[in-house]
Image: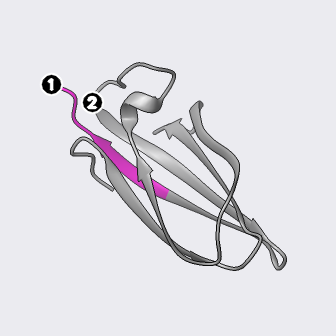
Amino acid sequence: LNFSPNALLHLRVAAGAELSLSVHTASGRPIAFPMEKQPLSEGLQQVEIRPFDWHGRAPQSGVYLLKVSVKDHNGRTQKILPLSVYNP
């Protein structure tokens, strides 16, 4: 994902799904939790991610990791996606 100044994450989820997002440094240290147990409607979802939402300040330029976790009646699915942030 690349920010310009935001990114869109597209997900297809089942009824009753919950979304959690966390942002980590390239070494894996968590630095922000933009969403925790956010309920989602069934079907295709579009989630906007904005780096300035991370504790009210803009992150430094660099590569970060976005941990995406979706929990539904089938269990939990997790993915880790690279994020490229440029903050001049």
Q: Residue 41 or 7: which is nearer the viewer? A: 41
Q: Residue at x 32, y 24 (%)?
A: 60
Q: Which amino acid does label 2 sit on?
A: Ser
**Within 10 angstroms of label 2, few (less than 14), some, or many (20 or more) residues?**
few
Instruction: Give yes or no for residue 35 being in the magenta stretch.
Output: no
Q: Name the residue under label 1.
A: 88
Q: What kind of element bears circle 2?
A: loop
Looking at the image, residue 5 lies above or below residue 55: below
Q: Is the magenta stretch mostly helix, strand or loop?
A: strand
Q: In which quarter of the image is residue 61?
A: top left
Q: Give the range drawn in magenta.
A: 81-88
Q: Which of marks 2 and 1 is nearer the N terminus?
A: 2
Residue receiving disc 2: 61
Mark 2 and mark 1 residues within 8 Å of each other at the beta carbon: yes
Q: Quadrant of residue 36?
A: top right
Residue 12: image x %, image y %?
A: 55, 78
Front position in the image: 43 or 30? 43
Count of numbered circles on the image:
2
Residue that lies at the very extreme toward the front in this rendered image: 41
Q: How crowded is mark 1: few (under 14 residues within 10 Å), some or many (20 or more)?
A: few
Q: Residue at x 76, y 65 (%)?
A: 71
Is residue 84 rendered magenta in the image?
A: yes
